[in-house]
Image (spheres, rainbow, N blue to C red):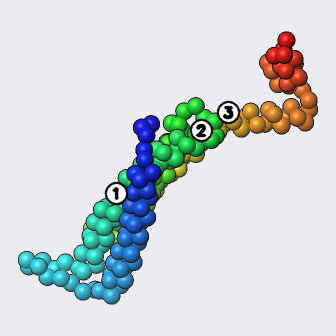
Amino acid sequence: MKSVSRREVGEKITSLISNSIKLALILVFLSFLRRQLQDSVVEAFNLQIPSKLIVDAIRLAAIAYFGQKVVVSLLFLLNIISDRLSKILGFEETGGLKRIGNDIIYMIGLLLAWFGLSPLFAFLPGKILGTILSVVFLILAALIVYDALRTGYDLFKEKFDRFVSQITFLITGIPEEGESKPDQKKGQRNR
């Protein structure tokens, strides 16, 4: 990984926090505005557009704009954190940790997309299309969670197996097949 400065990391953390707060405030305001508008209609170019649809479109645009900034900052920080964490945990490769982190970020993006798009599903003709889109989002979420869990299992399986082997040796005093006793290893090294 390329070297990064404290300033760059600080800017990404500031961007992450400020854009998250801006997004939250805008969503709260638009949610309040949507409740206040009730069933009002805006007329433009001989079209009657429900005010709720306009507010929902603005909400989707806000989620896309600020959500993208949040995700970019998260991805930048994820690379740095996964490298540091892999050194602490003693993993040679950081790919598994990055993949789990990416899955978490994908889940955040999927939730943001769902939050932005789900109110617009009400304006689609027919309930079946909205239901189909909801099921698609649910299936995508399930696949992301499955991938994160499988990657985590694969990543920590070796460490867990080694931990169980050490505990078993401490309890029984019998080394696993193919291993020599710790005392024998020390004796062989000293000779």
**Residue pictured at 79% horizontal, 18% vertical:** 178
**Residue pictured at 80% horizontal, 32% vertical:** 165
Crowd class of label 2 (few under 14; some 14 to 19; many from 20; radius 10 Å) = few
Ranked by sequence position, the earlier of labels 2 and 3 is 2
The amino acid on which the numbered mark 3 sits, given as a three-letter code, is Glu
Q: Nearer the viewer, residue 101 or 38?
A: 101
Quadrant for residue 33, please give it: bottom left
Residue 139 visible in the shown view: no
The numbered disc on residue 158 is 3
For this view, does 45 lie left or right of residue 124? left
**Residue pictured at 76% horizontal, 37% vertical:** 163
Ranked by sequence position, the earlier of labels 1 and 3 is 1
Q: Measuring from the top left, give residue 159's x and y in whole percent.
A: 69, 36
The amino acid on which the numbered mark 1 sits, given as a three-letter code, is Gln
The numbered disc on residue 88 is none
Quarter of the N terminus within the rendering: top left
Quarter of the C terminus within the rendering: top right
Quadrant for residue 24, please give it: bottom left
Q: Measuring from the top left, give residue 126's x and y in whole percent.
A: 30, 67
Residue at mark 2 to residue at mark 3: CA–CA distance: 16 Å
Mark 2–mark 3 CB contact (< 8 Å): no
Ranked by sequence position, the earlier of labels 1 and 2 is 1
Mark 1–mark 2 CB contact (< 8 Å): no
Q: Which residue is mark 1?
A: 68
Q: Measuring from the top left, give residue 114's x and y in whole percent.
A: 39, 62
The amino acid on which the numbered mark 2 sits, given as a three-letter code, is Lys
Q: Which residue is mark 2?
A: 87
